[in-house]
Amino acid sequence: METRLITLADAQKLAALHQVSFAESAWTAAQIAGSLVQPSTRGWVSEEEGRPVAFILFQITQDEAEILTFCVAPTHRRKGLGATLLETAFGQMNTGRIFLEVAADNVAAVRLYEKAGFRLNGRRKAYYPHGTGAVDAVMLVWKRSNRA
Ligand SMILES: CC(C)(COP(=O)(O)OP(=O)(O)OC[C@H]1O[C@@H](n2cnc3c(N)ncnc32)[C@H](O)[C@@H]1OP(=O)(O)O)[C@@H](O)C(=O)NCCC(=O)NCCS
């Protein structure tokens, strides 16, 4: 497994991975490319034999960053890949605080983020459309200064 910075040339392959992770809310290659051309976007991809199996995108503004999207291929989950990718990316960034929003019912992601040291920063009621209703967004923050 190799982890490297994402480039614009990766957009198509990353869109295929996003599709199997997010289905109807997946980003197209054009949307991913549109994000990658922004100077504030930075991302890392983990590849196995040249095929992307996980990636993460951040929007970085001065001393803060936000996770825009993050996924691991369904075939490669629960092997520590997501946690390792997060750790690698954080190690190569020098931002003091990292924010994100995640659906409150996304147990896998919420647990992973808590384990990585994220803490609750707020809640947005009925933020994500879900079936005929909506699910809350949990807002989390990671502070470099809080690290053990
Ligand atoms: C969330 C996601 C990125 C996790 O990736 P992963 O590589 O499977 O996660 P890891 O194997 O590194 O897991 C790290 C920890 O997270 C927690 N975790 C991960 N998947 C879990 C699950 N399905 N159920 C419960 N806890 C889970 C566990 O605490 C795990 O540690 P453990 O295996 O020692 O118990 C992956 O499930 C995914 O791509 N989901 C779909 C896209 C998504 O929801 N992205 C996040 C949007 S904000």
Image: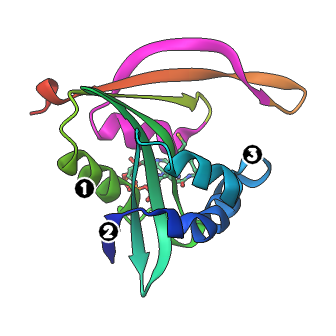
Q: Is residue 37 left or right of residue 61?
A: right
Q: Secondary structure at mark 2?
A: strand
Q: Are marks 3 and 2 in contact (CB under 8 Å)?
A: no
- Give the amino acid at mark 1: Thr
Label 3 vs 2, first from the N-terminus: 2
Rounded to the nearest angstrom, the CA distance separating label 3 from label 2 is: 25 Å
In the figure, 67 relative to 4: above or below? above
Q: Quadrant of residue 114?
A: top left
Residue situated in front as seen by the camera: 142 or 132:
142
Is the residue under label 2 in contact with that under label 1 (CB below 8 Å)? yes
- Quickly name the residue at label 3: 25
Q: How many marks?
A: 3
| Label 3 near ligand 1 (CB < 8 Å) | no
Q: Is 115 colored magenta in this rendering?
A: yes
> Magenta residues?
106-129
Identify the element where label 3 is drawn. Answer: helix
Give the residue number, with chain letter if any, for mark 1.
88
The quadrant in which residue 41 appears is top left
Q: Secondary structure at mark 1?
A: helix
Q: Where is residue 128 shown, x and y percent of the image?
A: 71, 26
Task: Report x, y in % for residue 54.
Answer: 47, 63
Tell me if the residue at label 2 has its CB under 8 Å from ligand 1. no
Assess whether residue 126 is covered by the magenta stretch.
Answer: yes
**What residue is at 42 percent from the left and 81 percent from the top?**
48
Above-or-below relation of 31 to 15: above
Q: Viewer-proximal residue, 68 or 109?
A: 68
What residue is shown with label 2? 3
Which amino acid type is marked by label 3? Ser
